[in-house]
C-alpha cells in the first residue's frame, strides 16, 4: 500500500518551477533517502509532499486522499515533517517540547487524555530521553537535541516521518546515532521514513530505496546497490570516483576528484 503519492507534481517559488515529478509512490514501511547536488530540489520535494509548499500543478495523495483537501490537524495525525535545524526556546524542557507533538490530538481546551500521556512516554522511551526529560533543550548536545525533535514528531504518532537533512551540523558519532535510531523505529515500529541526506555512504548504508535528483528531476530510483555507479557520480555529482560492492554489505562510494568540466551536466 502506498502512503504517499505524487502525480504530475510541479513545485516552485513565484514564477520559477524548481521540481517536476511526473509520478512518485512511497510504500508503507519504506526507508527512503533522497540525494542529489545542492540546488537539485530535494528539500523542495520534501516540503511539497508534506503540504508545506503548495504545488504549482499536480497533486499529492496521503493514504489515497488529496492532501490539499485535508485539514492541517488531520494531516498532522498521519504525517510529521522535521525541517533543517528547527529552533526551540532554550529554556523549554525536553518533556515540554515532546508534549508539543500531541497538539493535533488534544481535545477541546487542550486537555490531555491518558492516551496522550502514553504517547509522550512512548516517544521519550523510544528515543532514550528518560534521563534528560527535565533538562532544558538549550543545554543539550546537538545529537541529544535532534533526538528530542524526533521524539516530538513521534508523539504525533504519525505513520510517515519526513526529515530534511537530520544530520546537519552533527559530528559523525551523532550522525550515526540519529540514523541508527531512525532505522530502529522503521524496523521495529513500521514507521515510514523519507529523508534528505547529503552523505552518499550514509544514504547507501541506511536506505532501502534511494532517489537521486538532478535539476529538479528524479534521475534514478531504486535500491542503492542497483543505482549507485561511477557514471552516476560523474553525471549527477560532477566527481570521478568508484563504487565498491561487497557481499552482503551496502555499496561504498569513493569520490576521488572533480570530473572534467566538460563532463558536468549542463
Image (tube, grey):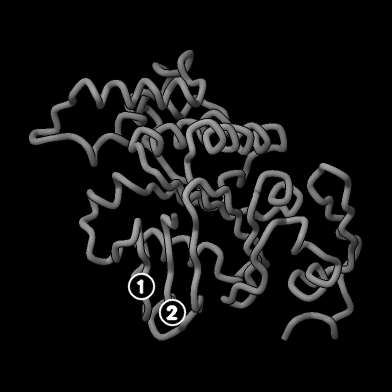
Using the image, determine if residue 194 lies above or below residue 232.
Answer: above
**Extreme residue in the left direction:** 108
Going from the N terminus, do you reach mark 1 or mark 2 first? 2
Q: Nearer the viewer, residue 184 or 101?
A: 184
Quadrant assignment for the C terminus: bottom right
Give the x, y percent position of residue 223: 69, 57
Q: Secondary structure at mark 1?
A: strand
- Apparent side of residue 212 relative to residue 121 in the rendered image (left or right): right
Quadrant containing the N terminus in the rendered view: bottom left
- Per the model, the C-alpha gap separating discs 1 and 2 is 7 Å
* Horizontal and vertical percent position of residue 77: 29, 44
Residue 59: name its quadrant.
Answer: bottom left
Q: Which residue is mark 1?
A: 59
* Residue in the image at 87% along x and 52% along y: 245
Q: Quick one: 7 or 124, which is closer to the camera?
A: 7
Give the numbered dot on residue 8.
Answer: 2
Say which quarter of the image contains residue 257: bottom right
Left or right placement of residue 186 versus residue 57 in this view: right
Q: Please give the name of the residue rendered at 45% of the width and 16% of the height, measured from the top-left corner.
A: 130
Furthest residue toward front: 1
Location of residue 5 in the rendering, given as x and y in whole percent from the top left corner: 43, 65
Q: Residue at 48% of width from left, 33% of height from top?
A: 189
Amino acid at each position: 500500500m502506498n502512503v504517499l503519492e505524487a502525480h504530475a507534481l510541479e513545485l516552485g517559488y513565484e514564477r520559477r518551477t524548481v521540481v517536476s515529478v511526473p509520478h512518485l509512490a512511497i510504500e508503507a514501511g519504506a526507508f527512503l533517502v533522497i540525494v542529489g547536488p545542492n540546488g537539485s530540489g530535494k528539500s523542495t520535494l520534501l516540503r511539497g509532499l508534506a503540504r508545506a509548499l503548495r504545488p504549482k500543478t499536480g497533486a499529492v495523495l496521503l493514504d489515497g486522499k488529496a492532501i490539499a483537501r485535508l485539514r492541517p490537524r488531520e494531516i498532522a495525525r498521519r504525517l510529521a515533517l522535521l525541517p533543517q535545524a528547527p529552533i526551540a526556546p532554550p529554556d523549554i524542557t525536553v518533556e515540554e517540547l515532546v508534549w508539543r507533538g500531541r497538539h493535533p490530538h488534544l481535545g477541546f481546551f487542550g486537555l490531555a487524555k491518558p492516551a496522550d500521556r502514553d504517547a509522550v512516554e512512548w516517544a521519550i522511551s523510544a528515543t532514550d530521553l528518560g534521563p534528560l526529560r527535565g533538562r532544558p533543550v538549550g543545554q543539550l548536545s546537538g545529537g541529544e537535541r535532534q533526538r528530542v525533535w524526533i521524539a516530538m514528531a513521534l508523539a504525533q504518532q504519525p505513520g510517515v516521518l519526513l526529515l530534511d537533512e537530520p544530520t546537519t551540523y552533527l559530528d559523525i558519532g551523532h550522525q550515526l546515532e540519529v540514523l541508527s535510531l531512525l532505522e530502529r523505529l522503521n524496523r521495529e515500529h513500521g514507521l515510514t521514513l523519507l529523508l534528505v541526506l547529503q552523505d552518499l555512504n550514509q544514504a547507501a548504508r541506511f536506505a532501502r530505496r534511494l532517489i537521486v535528483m538532478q535539476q529538479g528531476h528524479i534521475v534514478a530510483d531504486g535500491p542503492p546497490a542497483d543505482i549507485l555507479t561511477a557514471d552516476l557520480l560523474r553525471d549527477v555529482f560532477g566527481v570521478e570516483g568508484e563504487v565498491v560492492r561487497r557481499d552482503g554489505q551496502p555499496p561504498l562510494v569513493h569520490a576521488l576528484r572533480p570530473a572534467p568540466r566538460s563532463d558536468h551536466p549542463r
